[in-house]
Image: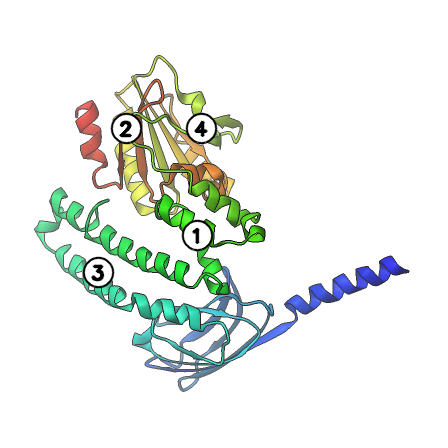
Amino acid sequence: MKKLTVLAALLTATIQAIAGEIKITANLTGFSDTAVVYLISGQTPIAYKTLTQGKVELSAEVSETPENYMMYIVDNNQPYFTGLFVADETLQITAAKEDFPYQVKVNGSKHHFAKEKLNELQMPLHKKGEAFKQEIIALQQTPEWQKPEVQEKYVGENGLGSKLAFELKQIEADFILNNFDNAYTWTLLPYNTTAFDKTFYKAVYNKMNAEQKQTEIGKKYLLASKSQRLTKGDSFIDIAVLDKDLKAEKLSDHFTQDKEHVLIDLSSVSCPSSRQAFEITQELTKNKEKLQVVSVLQSPDAATYQQFGAYSTSNWAIVYAEDFINTDTYIQYQENGTPTFLLFDNEGKLIDRWSGALIHQQKLEQHFGK
């Protein structure tokens, strides 16, 4: 009888954890009456309605624990969105079309204030980023944009765009360290295990209590605090992958003495630059028999990967790294951009690294000729 009582108590606790309701009243100006407003959890819409005279009311069952949600609006085929960090609360949201995504006002939440604070801290850089985007769009309409050095200046690995992105992440890092005990801060931790350096990872880990250090995210930050990006002469780190037939193998299987170089390509099926780089790699491998290329592909599922794996050749292996960004190996590499290229000799020692499709052709010609 006692076991049944305990089980009933556990079931009740579980039900209570999810038995909450969020109620949203939104006043949104600048949108048409055909605009549809969605509340999204993860990638799943949990409520939606058509906007009527600038107003909409949404409700859905949610957890009592605060989580990240998204208000997503489609108006004349154009998307607008903003993030919400809320629980089972009654919210009043006020915004004009131009306020999306970072200046939407959310009232009635005990949790969203932290996300709003980070938005405010980053707002000057968000505005700078929008101006930067418009500058690139204008430049793309001119012959000047066709020059590789111009593209590298703006969107290359060390270009203006990358510097702006780093500044945004630096504000986020400071926010994490200064607001460590906030629930919203902990939702940011999983996305920052490859974004910085050992100093940041150690600072985060040292702020954790003994119990937090034993959690999965605690162990990841401990590993990150001991990891760093490979530099010239460092050995490659092995990766567990699947071949084009979804059979298990390792990255080390592709290092053989009959090849002079091994080029590791960390790519993603959802990354346009990765796809652009594929075409360059494909042309190169046609007449470079002493080069082994291994494209380690991040993909949401094996079926999506297999479409790419079919292009594998004798000296270009397109392999699948299942759930790679959640592995310890991903943290050890400290590479968070795709595509990233790591060129090794046949002993597995790093010769060079680069990132992005723009410089890919230039680097390949530098090492292997045209």
Q: Earlier in the sequence, mark 4 or mark 1?
A: 1
Q: Which disc, if any, is residue 204?
A: 1
Q: Which disc, if any, is residue 73?
A: none
Real-space Cα separation, disc 4 to disc 3, in angstroms = 38 Å
Vertical comparison of 136 with 359: above or below: below
Foreground tag (4 vs 1): 1
Task: Residue 66 in the image: state x and y as whole percent.
Answer: 54, 67
Check disc 4: other Cα within 10 Å, few if <14, some if 14-19, many if 20+.
Answer: few
Real-space Cα separation, disc 4 to disc 2, in angstroms = 17 Å
Per the image, the residue denoted by label 3 is: 133
Q: Are marks 3 and 2 in contact (CB under 8 Å)?
A: no
Q: Earlier in the sequence, mark 3 or mark 2?
A: 3
Foreground tag (1 vs 2): 1
Q: Secondary structure at mark 3?
A: helix
Vertical comparison of 137 with 226: above or below: below
Q: Which disc, if any, is residue 238?
A: 4
Q: Which disc, if any, is residue 232?
A: 2
Instruction: Tell me which amino acid carries mark 1.
Output: Val
Q: Earlier in the sequence, mark 4 or mark 3?
A: 3
Instruction: Tell me which amino acid carries mark 3.
Output: Lys
Task: Say which quadrant the C terminus sits in.
Answer: top left
Check disc 1: other Cα within 10 Å, few if <14, some if 14-19, many if 20+.
Answer: some
Real-space Cα separation, disc 3 to disc 1, in angstroms = 33 Å
Task: Say which quadrant the N terminus sits in.
Answer: bottom right
Q: Secondary structure at mark 2?
A: loop
Foreground tag (3 vs 2): 2
Real-space Cα separation, disc 1 to disc 2, in angstroms = 28 Å
Instruction: Tell me which amino acid carries mark 2.
Output: Lys
Q: Earlier in the sequence, mark 4 or mark 2?
A: 2
Q: State the residue lying farthest toward the bottom.
A: 53
Nearest to the observer: residue 9 or residue 209: 209
